[in-house]
Amino acid sequence: MRIALVILSLVVCGGGIAGFFWNQDLKYSIPTPVPMDYKEVAVGQAIAVSPLASNQAYFLHFYSADCPCSRFNARHVKSLIRSYGDSLQIVIIVASADDIEKAKKELGSDLDIRVDTNGSIAKACGVYSTPQAAIIDREGKLYYRGNYNQSRYCTVRATNFAELSLIALLNHQPSPSFGLLATQSYGCPIDNKNNAVLFNF
């Protein structure tokens, strides 16, 4: 009887540890499940976001305070804001009004933070997880949509996909093609239920 209790305790403990690692780490190493109603948005496609200022390029950062992956790359996003914030409009997109204060605390209090009601901006850009970047060029077309880096902490400079795309845009070059490592979403699914704050540029 005592052996059975010890084995049961070890199984329960092992299951708890496995569950913890799954929730904190392992599930973010596999692609985010694609929503059933997902419609892919191709680079070069006009983005139906209104009203966008004419002749203005946008960098949209999709953020969720409850997503560990959003927190993992916060330092990198802040460095992009410092480096490129004067060259284009950077907007932090959150799915819930509850995330506004958390985003200000983590990314900066003077940022342009907007709530995406019902996920309309995310859908228009082809985004369904956080963190993701979407770059819209001055003609209102999608220039880049995807991950920030191959590494969750954005430490591999050669795969700084979002930053490399920003540099190419600002140098008037065609949008780079990085493949699945950049475009296949990893992170936390966006949940746009019960939002009541209107999104408006």
Image (spheres, helix red, strand yellow):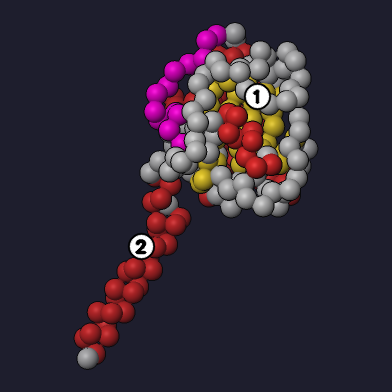
Q: Residue at label 1?
A: 48
Q: Which residues are magenta?
A: 173-186
- Give the amino acid at mark 2: Ala
Residue shown at 64% from the left, 33% from the top: 121
Circle 2: element type: helix
Badge 1 density bin: few <14, some 14–19, many ≥20, Cα 10 Å: some
Q: Is residue 174 magenta?
A: yes
Q: CA distance from mark 1 to mark 2?
A: 43 Å
In the image shown, does 64 or 200 lie closer to the viewer? 200
> Of callouts 1 and 2, which one flags the residue occurring earlier in the amino acid sequence?
2
- Judge from the rendering whether residue 155 lies leftward or rightward of residue 46; answer left or right: left
Other residues around mark 2 within 10 Å, as few (<14) / some (14–19) / many (≥20): few
Numbered disc in front, either 1 or 2? 1
Task: Name the quadrant containing residue 52.
Answer: top right
On the picture, is 52 further left or further right than 119?
Answer: right
Residue drawn at the location 64% of the way across and 30% of the way down? 60
Could you tell me residue 58's position as x and y percent? 67, 23
How would you classify the magenta stretch by its main secondary structure?
A: loop
Residue denoted by label 2: 18
Position in image of residue 93 (x %, y %) = 66, 38
Please identify the quadrant where the N terminus is shown: bottom left
Tell me whether circle 1 and circle 2 mark residues in contact (CB < 8 Å): no
- 138 vs 193: above or below: above
194 with respect to 39 (left or right): right
Q: Amino acid at mark 1?
A: Ala
